[in-house]
Structure formats: C-alpha cells, structure tokens
Image: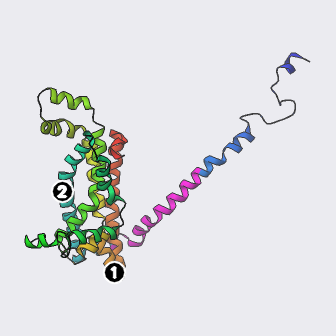
C-alpha cells in the first residue's frame, strides 16, 4: 500500500459522502428552513389584521372619521382617564414594588400572586369583581354611597377599572427593576446617614428609572386598550364612560369606517409604546421587563 493511500480518510475509497459535504449540508438545512417557515407564518398571521386596518381605512377616510365629534370625545376621555389611572398606579405601585423587591417577609409570595392575578383574569371577571366590591350592592357600596361617591356608570368608574387592569404591569416591571439595583448602593446610602425615604427617592428610583419607565409604558398601553372591565363596571355612555375601545365596539355595526379609524389610532399609539419599551430594553438591559 502506498503512503498516500495509507493516509486516506475512512470512506474515501468507497465513495461515501464526507462530513460537511453538500449532502450533509443539505440534510442539516431542513431545520433552519422549518424555523424560518414558522416565523413567516406567525408574522403573516399577526401582521395581516393590523395592516388591513390601514389598507381598508385610507388616509382620507381616516381623517374624516376622526373629525367626528364623538370620536374626539372618545379619544379625549381615553387619554384623560388613562393618564389619571396610570398616575395612581405609579404613585401607589412604585413604593409597593420597592417593598416587595427589597424585603422578605412571610406571605410575600401570596401577596405577589394576588397583585399579579389581574394579569390572567378574564375582563368579564374583572368587571364582575369590581361590581361586587364597589357597586351599589357591593361590599363597599353602602360606604361609598354614604360618602357621596358614585363609580358605576361614571367617569370615575372608568378610572377604577383602568387602575385594576393596568396596575400589575407596572408592579411587575418596577419590582424587577428595583431587584436589579445593586444592594451596595442602598447600603452605602444608609451608611452615610440617609433614611429609608431618602434612599428610595435619591438612589433606588434613579437607578431603576429605565425599568420604571417601561412599567409605565406597559401600564399605559394596557389601560388605553381596556374594554371588558370598563364596559361591565362603568358602561358605555358617550362623553362619560365611552373610551376608544368602547366607541369602536359601538360603531362596529353602524359606522365601520369610524371603527377602523379609531382602531388605527390605537394601533399607532400601541406601536409607539411598544417601540419605546423595546428601546428601553435594548439600551438598559431586559431585566426591567422580566
């Protein structure tokens, strides 16, 4: 046997395909192709309804529909109630999230579970729960009536419903953001004489600000798109409780162009919010969004 033949790799004499050859690469290409096919199907399925809203509406009909007074009323009410609701969520949820992120106590996991429960509750259940708790015949209904506070079928009821459904989004993001803050910074602040409140305001909040901003954006987007709980608890009355999602539902049968126009507005706002969250995640890490 010659020296060249002695060094031939196994299978060379029999004509077997070599590792890494065209046949092997072809056999290994099916799975990446399957992945891209799955991505293409998902993208088409999820993007087509969104694109159809704008294709069916058209710029002229969009502008004309948004010129309708009832559309402007719904937009104004949605922006006002959403902003108030998210302000309440931030004011109450941020310190609550800080406590959950920095303290360990008995029953903590149960508390977190209860606070996050609205994330998975069906909207109808949320609306029924609010009625059972705060409605005229609810647990606190008599007390609220004695205090002259009316929530059902009122704008204030819209705010309550929005707070209920959006609070868990900010709580979860804020808790993760505070948990990611280096504990040594907090300890150093206390060592230098700063109290708990000063440490929270001057150290923890600035350090967790990207995650807090992401939580605000998520809560704002959820509140802006809320439908079921608002309808069941506050009703749908033009200029009082009819937000944009309720106006879309109201126009579905009688003014489809108007429903499309309002839907397009929500798509644009939601896309802007989602993009801002993605940019925050990219610039400051994904921990704030977990």
| Whole-percent x, y for residue 136 in the image | 18, 76
| Residue assigned mark 1 | 255
Are the residues flagged by discs 1 and 2 in contact, CB closer than 8 Å?
no
Furthest residue toward left:
147
Please name the residue shown 17% across and 39% down the image.
200
Magenta-colored span:
35-61
Is 58 positioned to the left or the right of 193 in the image? right
Q: Residues within 10 Å of mark 2 (few under 14, many from 20)?
A: some
The answer to which of marks 1 and 2 sits earlier in the sequence is 2
* Depth check, front residue: 110 or 241: 110
| Residue assigned mark 2 | 88
Q: Residues within 10 Å of mark 1 (few under 14, many from 20)?
A: few
Please name the residue shown 28% across and 51% down the image.
111
- Tell me the chief SS of the magenta region: helix
Please name the residue shown 15% across and 40% down the image.
201
Question: Does residue 195 belong to the magenta stretch?
Answer: no
Mark sitting on residue 123: none
């Amino acid at each position: 046997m010659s020296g060249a033949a002695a060094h031939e790799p196994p299978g060379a004499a029999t004509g077997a395909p070599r590792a890494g050859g065209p046949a092997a690469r072809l056999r290994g290409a099916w799975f990446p192709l399957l992945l891209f096919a799955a991505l293409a199907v998902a993208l088409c399925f999820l993007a087509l309804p969104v694109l159809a809203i704008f294709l069916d509406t058209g710029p002229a009909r969009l502008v004309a529909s948004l010129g309708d007074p009832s559309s402007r009323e719904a937009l104004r009410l949605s922006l006002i109630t959403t902003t108030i609701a998210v302000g309440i969520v931030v004011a109450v949820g941020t310190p609550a999230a800080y406590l959950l992120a920095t303290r360990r106590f008995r029953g903590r996991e149960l508390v977190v579970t209860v606070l996050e429960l609205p994330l998975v509750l069906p909207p109808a259940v949320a609306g029924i729960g609010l009625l059972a708790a705060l409605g005229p015949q609810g647990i606190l209904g008599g007390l609220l009536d004695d205090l002259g506070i009316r929530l059902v079928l009122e704008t204030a009821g819209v705010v309550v419903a929005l707070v209920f459904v959006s609070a868990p989004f900010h709580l979860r993001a804020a808790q993760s953001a505070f948990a990611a803050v280096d504990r040594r910074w907090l300890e150093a602040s206390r060592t230098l004489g700063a109290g708990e409140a000063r440490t929270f305001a001057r150290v923890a909040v600035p350090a967790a600000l990207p995650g807090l901003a992401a939580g605000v954006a998520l809560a704002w987007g959820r509140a802006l798109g809320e439908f079921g709980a608002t309808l069941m608890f506050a009703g749908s009355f033009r200029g009082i409780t009819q937000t944009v999602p309720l106006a879309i539902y109201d126009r579905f049968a009688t003014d489809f162009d108007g429903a499309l126009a309002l839907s397009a507005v929500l798509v644009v706002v939601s896309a802007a919010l989602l993009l801002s969250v993605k940019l925050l995640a990219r610039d400051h890490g994904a921990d704030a969004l977990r």
